[in-house]
Image (cartoon, rainbow, N blue to C red):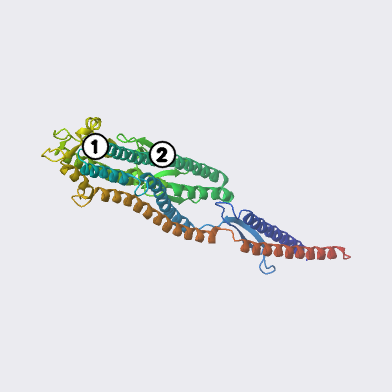
Amino acid sequence: MGSGLFSQLGMAARSMEAQSFGLDATGQNISNANTAGYTRRVVDFASIPPADPRISAGGGVEVTGVRAVRDRLLDRRFYQEQPLQSRAGAIYDSLSVAQTALGNPGASIDAKLSAFFDAWSGLADNPTSSSQRSQVIAQGQQLAASFRDMAGRLVTSQQEADSNVRATVDQINTLANQIASLNQKITATGVDGSLTLRDSQGEALKQLSTLVDIQTITNADGTVQVSFAQGHALVVGENAYTVGITNAATTGFAQVTSGGSDVTKFVSGGKLAGYLNVRDTLLPSYKTQLDTLAYGVATQINTLHTAGFDGNGAAGQNFFNPLATVAGAASQITVNGVVAASPSLVVAASTTGTPGDNTQARAFANLRDSKVLAGGTQTFGDAWSLLTYSVGQDASSAKADQDSRGEVVRQIENLRDSVSGVSMDEETANMMKFQRAYEANAKYFSVVNATLDTLLQLPT
């Protein structure tokens, strides 16, 4: 009988220790309810089998381990969706700045175009006026300067996107090194003792997924392998593989490399992909539209100007310095210095050269509403409106995509939280459960101990 009671004391003591362990895990959960990356701890208990089932119900309970509750399927889904949301967000942020650079409607190049053609209308009304010719030159110079300024703003936006690409690559390398270091510590600690390290690992992966699209493989020992851009390795075991940067020969822009290979075109998600898309696709398309408009203005004006006669009765010269190609036209457009220096060289008359003839000046004024661009389907004003619409529409689409994918990400995070997050109500219930179990075992221990004391005091 005494030996049985002694075994009961041991069973009660083990149970008290197990319930205390459960209380400790519950307290850890409550303490870290708002800690980023923390995953809920769960204690696993197992009953101790009896030494002899014929005379014992069992040996009580033991703690077999504590684990962090994770759902790898939800993690993988998160790593798929988060980069797409971040990509859209990077595009929207960049294009919002580009929209500001284009200026407000009626106060940018469209206003300069209107003022330029208004000056030609004024010359048509007073073709012999020297001051009106000077006004044409002044407005032409302002229009050219506006084109050059706008081209410079778009170049600046490209440079800012390139700077963001370089900064993002630095952040990717920092996080990759951090994950590799955590892998090393997890290996050294062992899977059973690395829960906090694995929480840090998960948070680092979450941050990394906002920067670039990633694929992960979790090993049995708790370490993780990370790759990006069609399988190029970022982290394998304790080794981080640096994402490199090379400068493109023609533009000087950063090209993303991995293992010596250019992987720029393979980056499809995260902020890195968004900045690359803005730098290499969207902004160049806007620059082309602006160059086409500037080239069209210069070419059409020069065609009419060289077909007429100036105030001296001589054949007209080019009003704008000729542009060789569409590419770069907006950044190169300037008023012919010879014409600018002598207002009398501004053309107003037609081929007759008759003093007071305003035929050509009216042709310039009428050019405002002429469809001379895009195969005769657009006016200059239409082309500018299409450019501003393109930027606004792309920004709006990126914002809508960001919001849509953000909702998907939030739903996935809610599902992850339902599995891995800390519920204060649930933890409070667990705390009471463990507390009552501890108290019951303590009372049981006290009863058994008292029984033993009684037995020991009996006369032999």
Q: Residue at x 65, y 64 (%)?
A: 429
Of the residues under marks 2 and 1, which one precedes in the sequence?
Answer: 1
Which residue ends up furthest to the bottom in the rendered image?
A: 54
Looking at the image, is 370 positioned above or below residue 62?
above
Question: Where is residue 210 drawn, in percent x and y?
Answer: 45, 49
Q: Residue at x 54, y 61 (%)?
A: 418
**Which image quarter: residue 311?**
top left
Q: Amino acid at mark 1?
A: Arg
- Nearer the observer, 420 or 401: 401
**Apparent side of residue 221 relative to residue 129 in the rendered image (left or right):** right
In what element is the residue under mark 2?
helix
Which residue ends up furthest to the left in the rendered image?
A: 352
Question: Few, some or many C-alpha atoms within 10 Å of disc 2 (few <14, some 14-19, many ≥20)?
Answer: some
Q: Residue at x 27, y 49 (%)?
A: 381
Q: Which residue is mark 2?
A: 163
Q: Which residue is mark 1?
A: 133
- Nearer the observer, 189 or 263: 263
